[in-house]
Image (cartoon, grey):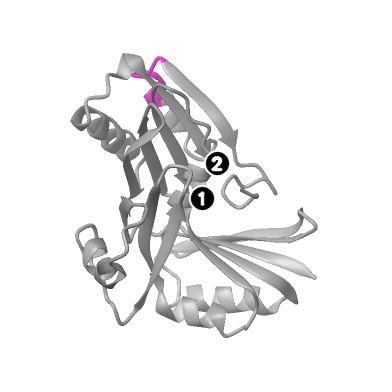
């Protein structure tokens, strides 16, 4: 039996099928201006039924989220908290919780309800997680100021850490690599991180976003490419 891993990002998703941690199949699908109205749901249904899966892992990188300290328990206000960052439709979005004990924070996030029900209706063991928690759990932080950037297709997420403490997290949908750079540099200026003293670490779709990285190098002295997604080695989808 095989395991299916799904990663949902802006206007699409990526997937991997694996057996005993060996990837046997992977693919991606992103909407375009020519895509039919139900194209995304139809493609997901196709992936869900093409194999007999033993377990499903779902990771959401959709930017409907909010960040709270670990232990915050007023779950009834989860939708309201997320609404400060993005419009929320409670009838169309499932409220989820993802806790990161390593850094003592938790995420409330929403996942499209039609997709949630489609996956749950398979009645298979299913794990849901938020990409920010997954990403943070794979970071090896040191006692310094750090910016960790995970790049996707037309999207990025990043953490600002100060001596292993999470200062800020954001998740951006942008169509331009220059926008990535603008948002990140603007954020740094607002939290008083001196560029010369801050270490930058980049993960994910680094080849696809090489313009962003080359522009970032013009401003940043301490920059390291930690992980470049290659076939069957997607950073977020491969393990914890």
Callout 2–callout 1 Cβ contact below 8 Å: yes
230 within the magenta span = no
What span is colored magenta in the figure? 215-221
Q: Is residue 170 left or right of residue 59?
A: left
Q: Nearer the viewer, residue 193 or 103?
A: 103
Q: Position of residue 47 (x, y in %)?
A: 64, 73
Q: Nearer the viewer, residue 106 or 44?
A: 106
Name the quadrant containing residue 31.
bottom left
Q: Position of residue 106 (x, y in %)?
A: 38, 54
Q: Residues within 10 Å of mark 1 (few under 14, many from 20)?
A: many
Q: Position of residue 197 (x, y in %)?
A: 34, 15
Residue at (64% x, 59% y) in the render: 27
Q: Is residue 101 left or right of residue 82?
A: right
Mark drawn on residue 9: none
The residue at which mark 1 appears reads as: 134
Q: Is residue 229 visible?
A: yes
Q: Is residue 57 left or right of residue 98?
A: right
Q: Residues within 10 Å of mark 2 (few under 14, many from 20)?
A: few
Q: Secondary structure at mark 1?
A: helix
The residue at which mark 2 appears reads as: 138
Residue at (31% x, 53% y) in the render: 68
Q: Quadrant of the N terminus?
A: bottom right
């Amino acid at each position: 039996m095989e395991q299916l891993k799904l990663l949902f990002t802006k206007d699409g998703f990526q997937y991997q099928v694996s057996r005993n941690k060996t990837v046997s199949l992977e693919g991606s699908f992103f909407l375009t201006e020519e895509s039919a109205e139900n194209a995304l749901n139809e493609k997901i249904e196709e992936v869900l039924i093409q194999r007999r899966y033993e377990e499903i892992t779902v990771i959401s990188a959709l930017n409907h989220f909010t960040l709270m300290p670990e232990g915050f328990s007023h779950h009834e206000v989860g939708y309201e908290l997320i609404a400060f960052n993005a419009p929320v439709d409670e009838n169309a979005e499932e409220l989820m919780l993802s806790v990161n004990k390593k850094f003592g924070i938790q995420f409330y996030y929403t996942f499209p309800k039609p997709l949630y029900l489609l996956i749950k209706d398979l009645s298979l063991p299913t794990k849901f997680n938020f990409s920010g928690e997954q990403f943070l759990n794979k970071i090896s932080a040191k006692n310094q100021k750090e910016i960790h950037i995970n790049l996707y297709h037309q999207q990025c997420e990043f953490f600002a850490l100060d001596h292993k403490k999470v200062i800020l997290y954001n998740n951006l949908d942008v169509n331009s690599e220059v926008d990535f750079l603008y948002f990140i540099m603007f954020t740094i200026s607002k939290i008083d991180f001196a560029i010369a003293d801050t270490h930058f670490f980049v993960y994910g779709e680094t080849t696809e976003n090489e313009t962003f990285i080359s522009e970032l190098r013009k401003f940043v002295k301490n920059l390291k490419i930690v992980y470049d997604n290659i076939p069957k080695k997607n950073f977020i989808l491969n393990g914890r």
